[in-house]
Structure formats: structure tokens, C-alpha cells
Image (tube, rainbow, N blue to C red):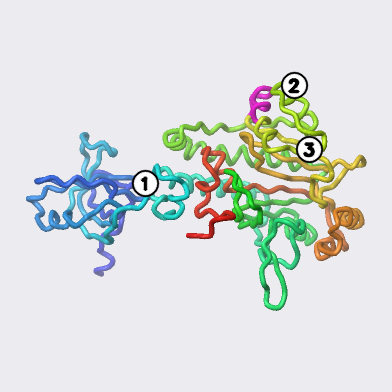
Amino acid sequence: MENENRLKRTRIGEIVPGTRVKIAGFIENLRNKRTMAFIVVRDITGKIQVTLVKEEHPELAALVDGMTLDSVITVTGQAVANDYVKLGGIEILPEEIKIESVADALPIKEDSAIDSRLDYRWIDLRSEKNQLIFRMQTEMTAAMRSFLLERGFLEFHSPKIIGAASESGSEVFRLDYFDGNAYLAQSPQFYKQMAMAAGFERVFECAPVFRAEKSYTRKHATEFTGFDLEFSYIDSFRDVMSFEEDLLIDMISHVAAKYGDDIRRLYGIDVIVPKKPFPVMSVADIYREIEQRYGYTVPDSEKGDLTTDAEHLTYRLAQELFGHEFMFVTDFSGDKRPFYHMRDEHGVPQGFDLIWRGTEITSGSQREHRYAQLCANAAEKGLGEDVKFYTEFFRYGCPPHGGFGLGVDRLTMLFLDISIKEAEFVFRGPDRLNP
């Protein structure tokens, strides 16, 4: 009976004036005056002021002397309305206070250099601004997951330890596997297609992806979270593009509705829900336009794919030509695309990249599902034996299919105009393995 009658914790964002509550959280601010103490306590849902009249509770006043910023306390008391209190017009008049944990002086501040903050990531993540990153990210992935489940997709989980390099012999992490070698998966691509050969028809996965790239840009990481999907019985790669439009419009609408105001307040960015159709241009047309408009040129040998600078200019181009933040890019050179992309009769890969705010967020395509042609494509890239396990998926019948992948961390980065180091819960790069 005692446990049943014990007051349960109320999250700060759910407090209603006129109720007796128990809260718990970090001390964000502390003003310890001679007769009064004002303690601002925060949890993931908000902040509230605890107002202590010392002469009424001398035993609690003694506790306040032992408190430090970022200590964790539990407070039980009355929640009352007070128009003079800035934090929502509510304060707590305490009856009991318990110090759960005393914090040392913090080794970083909010404006410390990013690498110093990453050394103490668990402290860095305590701020309202940083916690919004992961509240928004949760809404983002939940919205995409719901969208797919409503359309008959199955969620599956592919292996991350694999016996052959997943797309090529480069950019993979090799590890000892008992008496042999194994690799960390660069993507779930092969296993998404295995699911198509298994007759699953529609699958998706949200899982870690590993890339052994020695890149130090604001958008690259050696481990990140991918949101991948694949579906069967398509007629063209444009069916895949259309599906991605619908998915992104739905997801961004959910994020804007739930966190648009917070993103504007804390990051100064408006979440713009895109309209369909997204603009589409070929690689060749983009290079022609950005040369004429902005004087940007690259050697002809580079024009089969977008350079990083060309990606950035594509954002400007999309806004000027179409008033849009997104741009689909098509008609890449065959030597710039993976062997499993279907090609037309002219050898043009039937795939696309999607650029958002000047950064590529998706590579997608219709896949080559015909066994003989797939084997020929792999041999052309010098991958025959390396991917034999994969080409076996197609020997016994496989429907036409396509798909794409989105980087959850990169999407988060672009939503908030931050670096990938800040968008990941704990960043992994070429020179960072801790914490």
C-alpha cells in the first residue's frame, strides 16, 4: 500500500498549477539569497523554478548550500501559478528536496569548440538546443516508419557483419572473423534486394552503416544511421523518385507541425514543406546551367557526376529556376554508378541523386534484376567473384524493383544547419573513437 500511495514523478512540461507534484532534473540556475533560494530545474520536457523561503524550511535551506550547477535533485511540493515567474508562470513551493547527485564544475561550455564538446558529449547533450536535435530526429524517423507501414512495407534487419565487401573493395572496414576475414556493411543494399528475390515486395530498415572514408567534411562520418527501403514491381526509376517525394513531404510536414516553432526559436531556421513534383535535371543540363549562370566549370572527365561544389550550386539553381529546395539529378555516367543500377539501351544508369539544400541526401535507382545482365555489369567493374554470393539471389527469379537510402544524421544536419558531428548522438570519424 505504501508504494501505491507514493507520489509519482511528474515531468516538468506536464505540470498543472494547483497540484502537488514531484519533479526531478538538473539544476540549471541557482540563486542562493539570505532569506530566499531560487532553483531552476530542467528535464527533457522543460524548466521550472523552485522557490524556497528559508525561514519556513531551515532544513531545506541547509541542503541548498551543498548544491552546484548541474547537480541532480528531486523536489516534492505544490505547483502554484505566479505571474511574476518567467518560466511559464508556474513555480514550485518545496516541501522536500533530495540531492541525487552533486556535479563538479563543468569542463565545457555551450560555446566551447566542437571537438572539446565531443570529448564530454554527455554534458554537451544536456542543453535544450541539443536535445531538440534528437527529439526532432525521433519524429522524423517515426514519421517515415509510419508512412511505410501504412503502405504495406515490412521492417527487416540485415546483417552488418558480411563475408564480402558490400559494393566494392574500397571504403570498407575489414575485421578478423575467427579464422578468416569479414567486413562491416557499407549499406544493406544487397540484402534489400535479397528480400525482393524472397518475394517480400516492400521492405525498409533503419540501422547503422559503416564507411571507411578518410573524410573530414561537415557531412561525412565513418558510422551513421541509414534509412533504406526497396520495393518491387516498378516500371521505372521515376516510380522510385515519386515515392520518395511523397515520403519526404509527409515526414517534413510532421516535423514542421511538431517542432517547427522550436526549430525557428533555437536555430533560426524555417522548416519548409516541399511541394510535388520536385524539379528534375540531368547532370549535363546542371553543368551547362551553372557554367552559364555562375561561371563554374570542371574538366569533361568530371562531368559524369556532381562535384561537391556543383552540389552546392544545384541548391542555388533549384531556387532560381523552380523556387524549390530539392533537386533530382539524373543521367549519370555508367562508370560513376554502382554495377547493380539498371541501364537503358544507351548505357545510361536508371537512377538518381536527390539534393537538398546543396547536399546529396539520396542515391536511388531501378536495380538490375536480370541475372545475366547483372553478372555482366559486375564483371565490367571487376567484381565478378567478389559479389557472386549476391548475384546468386537473381538466378531463380526476381521481380523488377528499385529503392533508395537516406542518411538520418545527414537529414538532421540539413534540417538544422549543423555539422554531422553535432547531428549524431556520438560521432565517429577517422580520428574519433571515443567516448
In the picture, measured across the screen, residue 21 lies left or right of residue 341, that is left
Q: Residue 193 in the image: state x and y as whole percent.
A: 77, 57
Query: What's the magenta region?
Result: 315-324
- Who comes first in sequence, dot 3 or dot 2? 2
| Distance Cα–Cα, label 2 vs label 1 | 46 Å
Q: Residue 280 in the image: state x and y as whole percent.
A: 74, 32
Q: Tell me the SS state at disc 1.
A: loop
Looking at the image, which is closer to me, 72 or 86? 72
Looking at the image, which is closer to me, 256 or 153? 256
Quickly name the residue at label 3.
302
Dominant SS in magenta: helix
| Distance Cα–Cα, label 1 vs label 3 | 44 Å
Quickly name the residue at label 1.
109
Mark seen at residue 84: none
Looking at the image, which is closer to me, 279 or 285? 285
Residue in the image at 37% along x and 49% along y: 108
Q: Residue 239 in the image: state x and y as whole percent.
A: 77, 41
- Who comes first in sequence, dot 2 or dot 1? 1
